[in-house]
Each structure stands twice: as C-alpha cells, then as structure tokens.
Image (tube, rainbow, N blue to C red):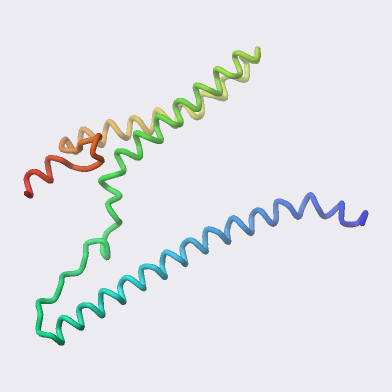
C-alpha cells in the first residue's frame, strides 16, 4: 500500500487529462454520427420524392453552414462579456474586502476578457445594424425577406 501512495499524485492528473481528451473526442464523434444520420434521412426523403415523381426538396442550409452561429454570436459575446466582467469585479471586490488589495489585481484578467467580449459585441453590432438583441436574431433582414 505504501508503494501506491507514491503513484497517486501522478495518477490523478493523468486520469484527468485522459478523461478530458476522451470526453472531447466522444463529443466530436457523437456530433459526427448525428450529422451522418440526419444526412441519411434527408437522402432517403429525396429518393422517395424522386420515385414518386414529386418535387425534390432542397438541401437545408445547415448541411453547408453552422446552425445559426453568426446570428447568435453577438448575443453570445454580450453574455460572456458581462459574465467575465462581473466575475472579475467580484474577484477584485472580494480580495479588497478581505484586506488583500495587492492580489486584487488578479481580477483584472477576467475584467479584460469581459471587456474584449463587449468590444467584439459592439464592433459586430456596428457591422450588422439589423440585429435585434431582444429577439436574438436579425429583425431587419426578416422584415425585408417577408
């Protein structure tokens, strides 16, 4: 048992690294399998439409592009910017209140990340003036298409 105590400090990080990489690889594989399944179903639907002489449905845009990530990226930048900014302020405030004002500067790291996200949000919003934050989509583009 005493021999195992020397191995244990190395075993915990090793298992954590292997499990972290394994979970990431599993997520990628499951996403790939889901995409294959969706494509096969759509292909069968197209073949049945051809056999029956019906109009062939077009391929969805999700097969070629991400699933609406460009529309929600502004909202995501705003959300994560506020989270990081407030987290940094909370860390700095907690350290100052505990009397450790020298270490409160560590709160500047998440504050900087939050400000960067908010800057990305403001730049993206200027480039796409039709984005409505309350609905999470592009209201001007929807109105012009309808």
Q: Quadrant of residue 105?
A: top right
> Which of 14 and 131 lies nearest the eye of the viewer?
131
Picture residue at 26% right of the left edge, 74% below the top: 42
Q: Quadrant of residue 22?
A: bottom right
Q: Is residue 31 left or right of residue 62?
A: right
**Which quadrant does the N terminus fall into?**
bottom right
- Above or below for 74 versus 44: above
Residue at the right extreme? 2
Q: Nearer the viewer, residue 10 or 130?
A: 130
Residue 95 higher or lower than 68, as above or below: above
Q: Where does residue 49 sit, x and y in percent of width and height?
A: 16, 80
Q: Residue at x 30, y 56 (%)?
A: 66
Name the one closer to the observer, 41 or 35: 41
- Can you give x and y, in whole percent of width and height, for residue 39 in the image? 30, 73
Q: Give the vertical position of 83 relative to 45 (above or below).
A: above
Please tell me whether residue 11 is drawn above or below residue 82 in the rendered image: below
Q: Is residue 111 left or right of residue 40?
A: right
Residue 48 placement: quadrant:
bottom left
Which residue lies most toward the bottom here? 51
- Extreme-front residue of the structure: 52
Q: Position of residue 74 (x, y in %)?
A: 29, 39
Q: Residue at x 61, y 18 (%)?
A: 95
* Apparent side of residue 140 relative to residue 106 in the rendered image (left or right): left
Q: Position of residue 113 (x, y in %)?
A: 44, 32
């Amino acid at each position: 048992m005493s021999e195992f105590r020397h191995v244990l400090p190395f075993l915990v990080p090793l298992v954590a690294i292997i499990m972290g990489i394994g979970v990431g690889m599993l997520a990628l594989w499951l996403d790939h399998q889901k995409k294959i399944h969706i494509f096969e179903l759509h292909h069968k639907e197209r073949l049945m439409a051809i056999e029956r002489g019906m109009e062939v449905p077009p391929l969805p845009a999700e097969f070629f592009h991400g699933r609406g990530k460009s529309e929600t990226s502004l909202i995501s930048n705003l959300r994560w910017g506020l989270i990081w900014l407030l987290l940094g302020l909370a860390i700095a405030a907690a350290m100052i209140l505990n009397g450790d004002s020298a270490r409160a500067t560590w709160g500047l790291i998440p504050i900087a990340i939050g400000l960067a996200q908010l800057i990305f949000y403001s730049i993206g919003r200027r480039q796409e003036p039709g984005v409505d934050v309350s609905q999470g989509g592009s209201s001007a583009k929807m109105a012009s298409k309808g």
